[in-house]
Amino acid sequence: MVKLFGKGDRLDKKSKTSLDKKLYDQGFKTYFQNTPQPVWMSRNYTKFADEAYAKNVIAHKCIAMISRLLASVDWKLYEFTDTKTFLKKHPILDIINYPNPQTSGSSLFESIISYKLISGNSFVLAVTDGNGTPRELYTLRPDRLSITTDKNGYVNSYIYNAGNKDIKYPVDKLTGRSVILHYKNFNPLNDHFGLSPIEAAAYSIDQHNAAAKWNQSLLQNGAKPSGALVVRPSSEGGAGSLSEEQFTRVKHQIEEQFSGHNNAGRPMLLEGGLDWKEMSISPKDMDFLQSKHTSAREIALAFGVPPQLLGIPGDNTYSNLAEARLALWEHTILPMLDDLADVLNRWLVPQFKRSDNLFVTYDKENIAALSLRTDALWTRLNAATFLSDAEKRKIAGIDKD
């Protein structure tokens, strides 16, 4: 169990029984015994997808930027015996690069990361042949998956709801292995489902969406609360007040003939007794613009994207875009790639025969955004006259054992 998700480790029956008892003695049973079954995500995935990804330009751009950049990285497979040998052909590389007839490798990883950023959870199904070897990979919508547990909190199975049919995928209780990969974020409030970055940025997303609606309303009304129709009192030759019928007629006339961008600048014909009073937005009312930019920065912060890359005014943390892109890769995308590579080595690789010495990794050398860091490293190495050429190459990651 120490190598529960290791490279195809197997436990004999005696070891499993002993290990199971040890887990219970350590309090594992007590911790999970109140877990409900089945377990569904406690947050509304559909609302996350609609309000953030579909309707909020900042959240959408963050998710799209991270997922597409990560999906652009090439994956490699190496065999480690006495030396590290990279393999050019292998079924593992085939399924990563061509997961199924309808999906490319980059599209698969883009959807995996997009689902994880939207819901905090991403599920991948491995379709196997008669020998249990994966032949195709598919991503599954997180809101269609539920988890069943036993009375002690062990995950028994994943249930996928496909219309009117539920498909059950069992989980090995001791090894935790299944044809379903559950790739999730850390969640301090849920034992089984991950926390979405959208939830952390929920207030900022709501504020940013509200500001966008405010702007839309202003555009539909000439980009400002243009003015008010005032009825002159009878002492000044006006009607004093409008009847219900007159009020309704004037209101409909304004909505139909003088509102919206198509009617911008159209002159208004006023009847006797009506005056037009110009109005303007006060500096206080204009604060919503700054509030919108603040909300945008907070959304970007939740996803780990430098606001400078999103064109948000007032943020110049990095001296140029190259530094901002490097920060995005170093602080957000590379850690996700490391985590994803680890997940593939724990879940996908062990499902193939004779895979004990095989490891999946990604090609860091061809990431253009990291050239700034590479150039700085070579500058320091060239200045280190006390190092030999061989030592410099090893430090730079070239000819590394």
Image (tube, rainbow, N blue to C red):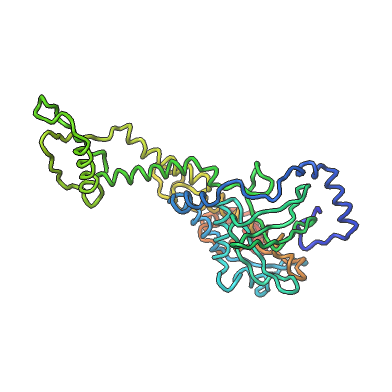
In the image, taking residue 187 as reference, residue 276 lies left or right, namely left
Of 222 and 268, nearer the camera is: 268
Which residue is the extreme one toward the right?
Answer: 14
In the rendered image, residue 348, in percent from the top left (x then y), is placed at: 69, 64
User: Which quadrant would residue 122 be assigned to in this image?
Assistant: bottom right
Q: Is residue 119 above or below residue 291?
A: below
Q: Quadrant of the N terminus?
A: bottom right
In the rendered image, residue 30, in percent from the top left (x then y), is placed at: 79, 41
In the image, taking residue 391 as reference, residue 371 lies left or right, namely left
Does residue 183 appear anywhere in the picture?
yes
In the image, taking residue 30 as reference, residue 386 lies left or right, namely left
User: Which quadrant would residue 108 be assigned to in this image?
Assistant: bottom right
Q: Quadrant of the C terminus?
A: bottom right
**Residue for point 55% across, 60% down:** 111
In the rendered image, residue 89, in percent from the top left (x then y), is placed at: 66, 75
**Residue for point 78% across, 63% down:** 8
